[in-house]
Image: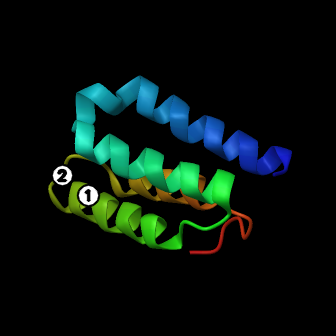
């Protein structure tokens, strides 16, 4: 693990802490946290990342999140993995 991945993980957790209970259900938060954990700690979590991408698209389509916020979250979750930024 390098500092860039750790920082990305920190951004994901901060996002969940700041808006999680307001804009996300418990299951949605768990989907995001599971993906970030798998990517950071196991180096494999690309199926989980795909689930986050699907979730974010649903949130944007339902006007619960902006596309910009959603893309930032997906980018941060992806950056937790060893191939940071690859989606």
Res. 72 in view: no
Q: Tell whether 17 sits left or right of 6.
A: left
Residue found 14% across the figure and 56% down from its top: 62
Q: Which residue is mark 2?
A: 63
Question: Total of numbered circles in the picture?
Answer: 2
Q: Which quadrant would residue 61 be assigned to in this image?
A: bottom left
Q: Is residue 86 left or right of residue 18?
A: right
Counting from the top left corner in percent of width and height, residue 53 is at: 39, 66
Q: Neighbour class for label 1 at 10 Å: few (<14), some, many (≥20)?
A: some
- The residue that appears at 42% across and 71% down in the rendered structure is 50
- Position of residue 49 relative to residue 7, above or below, is below
What kind of element bears circle 2? loop
The image quadrant of residue 10 is: top right
At 44% from the left edge and 65% from the top edge, which residue is drawn?
48
Residue at left offset 39%, top offset 61%: 52
Disc 2, disc 1: CB below 8 Å?
Answer: yes
Callout 1 secondary element: helix
> Taking 51 as reference, is 9 left or right?
right
For mark 1, what is the residue?
Answer: 60
Q: Residue placed farthest to the right in the image?
A: 2
Q: CA distance from mark 2 to mark 1?
A: 5 Å
Spot occupied by residue 7 in the image (x, y as percentages of width and height): 72, 40
- Residue 23 shown left or right of residue 49 in the figure: left
């Amino acid at each position: 693990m390098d500092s860039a991945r750790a920082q990305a993980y920190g951004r994901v957790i901060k996002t969940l802490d700041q808006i999680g209970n307001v804009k996300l259900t418990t299951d949605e938060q768990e989907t995001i946290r599971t993906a970030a954990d798998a990517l950071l700690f196991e180096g494999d979590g690309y199926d989980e990342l795909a689930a986050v991408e699907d979730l974010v698209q649903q949130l944007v389509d339902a006007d619960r999140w902006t596309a910009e916020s959603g893309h930032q979250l997906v980018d941060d979750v992806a950056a937790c993995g060893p191939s940071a930024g690859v989606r």
